[in-house]
Image: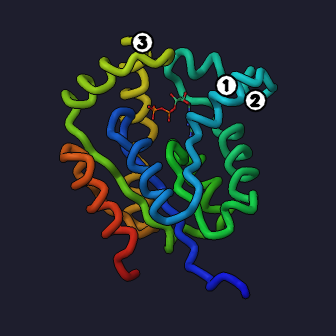
């Protein structure tokens, strides 16, 4: 017998580094039974493999800068064509710029049914969280650069998606379970 069809669940997480996107995206992916696609994780895997994409991406990542848009758009185009994305996916870390959002728009034919969750956390709390993290690309200077990149290049996406998708602003400065309950309710709300 064929499994009953389920609606496609496509979710985009927005929010600065340190907002808690990764953790919440993983929980949401498990709850919805769709893959979490973290572009940061994917890029780090390419770097570990030492392939062409990894070699191209690593100098940008070390400095806390963004990897060029065309590389990201092609990486996502290939990823969402994989069979495990048939019922949807959670995008964590993509799109991060307007050209990436345009690339996605073109690739999936519009984002009207896509849920966009914009996780916001006060700046002081972000600094506190990020300075305690200590990953390789989390050196103080790179942290500051990543927050600035977010502000300059990713925040314009808030306006972009507010008009084009099922957009929700989420207060990320609350206990993790409270945030998660909020996220789930937004995703499951009738369109
Ligand atoms: P964080 O969300 O904490 O900044 P990520 O793991 O999502 O960390 O990303 C780490 C780095 O990978 C980014 O600083 C950037 O250099 C690169 N990266 C990830 N996603 C993208 C993207 N969509 N566009 C450009 N660069 C990206």
Q: Residues within 10 Å of mark 1 (few under 14, many from 20)?
A: many
* Residue in the picture at 61% in, 61% down: 105
Quadrant of the image for the C terminus?
bottom left
| Residue at disc 1, CB closer than 8 Å to ligand 1 | yes
Give left or right: position of 55 versus 97.
right
Task: Using a 10 Å C-alpha cutoff, classify the residue at mark 2 as few (fewer than 14 neighbours), some (14 to 19) or many (20 or more).
Answer: some
Q: Callout 2: helix, strand or loop?
A: helix
- For the residues marked 1 and 3, what is the alpha-carbon distance in whole angstroms? 18 Å
Tell us which disc is closer to us: 1 or 3. Answer: 3
Say which residue label 1 marks.
57
Distance Cα–Cα, label 2 vs label 3: 23 Å
Its colouring scheme is rainbow
User: Which is nearer the eye, 172 or 97?
Assistant: 172
Secondary-structure class at tag 3: loop
Marks 1 and 2, Cα distance to the nearest angstrom? 6 Å
Q: Position of residue 157 (x, y in %)?
A: 43, 51
Residues 111 and 182: in front is 182
| Residue that numbered label 3 is attached to | 139
Of marks 1 and 3, which one's residue comes earlier in the chain?
Answer: 1
Vertically, is 49 above or below 15? Answer: above
Q: Is residue 70 left or right of residue 102?
A: right
Of mark 2 and mark 3, the one earlier in the sequence is 2
Residue that mark 2 sits on: 53
Label 1–label 2 contact, CB within 8 A? yes
Q: Residue at x 41, y 48 (%)?
A: 14
């Amino acid at each position: 017998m064929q499994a009953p069809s389920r609606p496609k669940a496509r979710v985009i997480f927005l929010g600065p580094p340190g907002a808690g996107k990764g953790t919440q995206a993983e929980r949401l992916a498990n709850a919805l039974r769709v893959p979490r696609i973290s572009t940061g994780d994917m890029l780090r895997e390419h770097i570990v493999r030492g392939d062409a994409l990894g070699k191209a991406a690593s100098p940008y990542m070390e400095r806390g800068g963004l990897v060029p848009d065309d590389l990201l758009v092609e990486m996502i185009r290939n990823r969402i064509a994989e069979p495990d994305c048939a019922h949807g996916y959670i995008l964590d870390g993509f799109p991060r710029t307007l050209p990436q959002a345009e690339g996605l728009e073109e690739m999936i034919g519009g984002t009207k049914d896509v849920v966009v969750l914009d996780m916001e956390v006060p700046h002081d709390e972000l600094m506190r969280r990020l300075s305690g993290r200590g990953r390789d690309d989390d050196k103080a200077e790179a942290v500051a650069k990543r927050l600035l990149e977010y502000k300059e290049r990713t925040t314009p996406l808030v306006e972009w998606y507010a008009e084009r998708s099922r957009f929700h602003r989420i207060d990320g400065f609350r206990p993790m379970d409270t945030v998660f309950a909020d996220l789930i309710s937004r995703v499951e709300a009738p369109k």
